[in-house]
Amino acid sequence: MKRVPDRRDFFRITAAGALGGLFPSVAPAVSVPASAAMHLVQPEFFGLHMAWPVRAPYADNFPTVPVAAWRAILPETHWFSLEPRQGEWKFDKLDIAMRLMESRGVDVLLTLGETPTWASSNPSRKGSYVYGQSAAPRRLADWENYVRTVAQRYRGRIRHYELWNEPSVREVDGDGAYFTAGQLVEMGQAAYRIIKETDPQARLTTPAMVGGEKGVDRLDAYLAAGGDRYADIVSFHYYGLPEQIPQYHAALLKVMARHGLERLPVWNTEFGYLIADPTSPNTHPLSGGSFSRVLPEHEAAAWLARSLVIAASLGIERFFWLLWDGKNASLTTYVGRRINAAGVAYGTVAGWLTGRRIGPMRQTGNVVFCPLVEKGTTSGRLAWTRDYKTMRWTVPKSWKAAAIVLLDDLSQEISSTGDIELSASPMLIRSAT
């Protein structure tokens, strides 16, 4: 995760005033026609960032929530750790992680990069871990050897690779950017060719762009320079309000269509918020953007749930939450690894969505909702308030509602009047059928 200055400072906007413009896909309440887009949510939709696979005691810390995909983007899995000196390879940590993931049936997305100092085109520039790590490699041959070595070692085991994490692009970000679009395309072309030669079943994503509309512009520059020919999946980071995800997704789809890629799957490979943790009291807001406020854990649970539901309703194929275990944005406490309210909500939403089809978002008055369909029948609706405020609401009789399920996975029967309390926290209104 890198802090990008142009991430929207959405926490400074009042929720009620912002949502009207940020959720244009929400329409007046209507019955959902059979032709409406209904997206099947696969187990792999629920991906996590996790540190435990490469840090002792390893298997003791496997998540207690459903997880079918892991994004491997840790210092121990970066190029600079795998090949700290030219020709000297250290795969022990990644090997341990791969064995753990395979034993649990978890798919691995390995993010390629970041550059060792010895291979960097800008070795004097300080990075988060080593000098020169965020710059392009000086020689393409070194990059090719790295990709080939990794692809050969994990042939048939790592099925998905991501080209780079959150690169800055000179055509969009100016002279201070680490890459030109052409440099990224050259690296993408080489990685695509080598991966396909080594393992034809493996797939490569675009670079994971970030920064709202500016991130979309970065992807546009990459695709326009020729990157449209070297991607099986579009990777993007939708950081922002949950209700901003449709706005960014619409812009992304427009760019993809312009380059003839509208049929490619879209993965949100990184997303999260700062979450208060009593065992790590030094968590503090960052200046601007998605991390300008630390959310209390129950508020974070509501934001997490809305983000997952909205993304699934849009057909985003995978959603990698940042993160399960760690500081500042974790679904567990840093000390003791106790699951927090956001972590519980993650597991609850996974239970609601996995294996079901989710319909488009709808709105009636101040209530946002979407249907869940199982075996061709509407099994329930997910609902919350548009303005984040708590309100009393009568469930339509046509929904044949029998019970509600809250984010803590506790169920309550609905009274004969159908009167319930809605809030910013999504709930499942389960149908009698």
Image (cartoon, grey):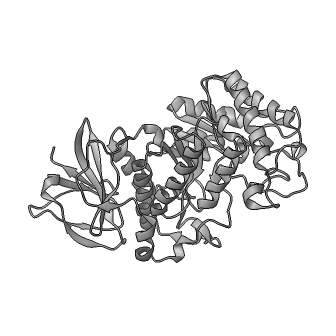
Residue 18 vs residue 358: left or right? Answer: right
Q: Quadrant of the C terminus?
A: top left
Q: Position of residue 123 (x, y in %)?
A: 90, 51
Is residue 321 in view?
Answer: no
Find residue 361 and report its image quarter.
bottom left
Q: Is residue 160 above or below residue 310?
A: above
Find residue 191 and report its image quarter.
top right
For the point 63% across and 22% down, the residue is: 200
Q: Quadrant of the N terminus?
A: bottom right
Q: Position of residue 414 (x, y in %)?
A: 15, 59
Is residue 251 in view?
Answer: yes
For the point 69% across and 45% down, the residue is: 224
Seen from the viewer's position, the closer of residues 294 and 310 is: 310
Q: Position of residue 228 (x, y in %)?
A: 65, 39
Q: Is residue 96 above or below residue 217?
A: above
Residue most extreme to the left: 416
Seen from the viewer's position, the closer of residues 70 and 188 is: 188
Residue most extreme to the front: 258
